[in-house]
Amino acid sequence: MLLYNFSPGWYTPLFYFLTDSVHLSSDAFGLCRAVQFGATLIASAVYGELSTRWSLKKLLWISVTINIVPGFMYLLIRGLVGAIAVSAIVGLLTGFVIVALFDMLTRFTPHGLEGSSTAIGYSVFGLAGAVGDIVGASVYARAGLTPCLVMDAVATAFILPILSRLPEAPVTNDQASPPLPVNA
């Protein structure tokens, strides 16, 4: 979660790049973000279907590998239509890996602690995004968007060695939780 959402090129730097360099309005940037979030929702449904056919490890490898470079597509756009198209593609790709990472978190959590691990996962995810945004804003002010995207790609690539250490078939938490003891 920490490595994936450390995204120095995605929040403030992307806003300034799209509004200052591509000359989109802040409303158009908001539309791009909405398209990205909508595509993330679609990616969740696709992941749900594919997770019944492919192993978690395979889904993680594919999604993390593909997510090393999608941010660089923003450097190619020249207007609103391109920004919306890239946002849709990026939303599908990033949404897929986010769902896969949270699926991994749930599957590797000790039985009965799924809620706690999800809360910790979201906290780490949010913290990584905030730190990445601060770092990204600082780097963007000095060097532009490309170095921010490079840092994001490197952080995502660092996930791959971790995936190589995962067991092929993790324990799943599909069975019902045992009842908690009642203190009378």
Image (cartoon, rainbow, N blue to C red):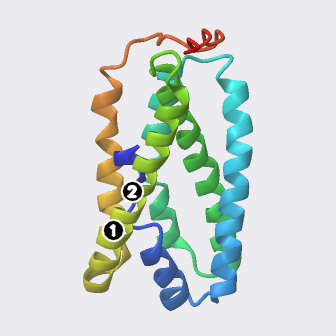
* Residue 73 vs residue 87, the one in the foreground: 87
Q: Which residue is mark 2?
A: 127
Residue 48: tell me if it is visible: yes
Percent of width and height locating residue 169: 47, 10
Q: Quadrant of the C terminus?
A: top right
Percent of width and height locating residue 146: 35, 71
Q: Quadrant of residue 159?
A: top left
Disc 1 marks a residue whose amino acid type is Cys
Residue at 47% x, 61% y: name it.
71
Residue at 43% x, 53% y: name it.
69
* Residue 122 vs residue 183, the one in the foreground: 183
Disc 2 marks a residue whose amino acid type is Leu
Residue 8: tell me if it is visible: no
Position of residue 39 in the picture relative to residue 178 (left or right):
right
Neighbourhood count class around disc 2 (C-alpha, 10 Å): few under 14, some 14–19, many 20 upward: some
Secondary structure at badge 2 equals helix
Residue at 59% x, 41% y: name it.
96
Neighbourhood count class around disc 1 (C-alpha, 10 Å): few under 14, some 14–19, many 20 upward: many
Position of residue 55 in the picture relative to residue 117 (left or right):
right
Percent of width and height locating residue 91: 62, 54
Q: Which residue is mark 1?
A: 148
Picture disc at residue 5: none
Position of residue 178 in the picture relative to residue 5 (left or right):
right
Q: Looking at the image, is mark 1 or mark 2 nearer the viewer?
A: 2
Give the total number of marks visible in the rendering.
Answer: 2
Against 170, residue 30 (above or below) is below
Percent of width and height locating residue 163: 35, 27
Q: CA distance from mark 1 to mark 2?
A: 17 Å
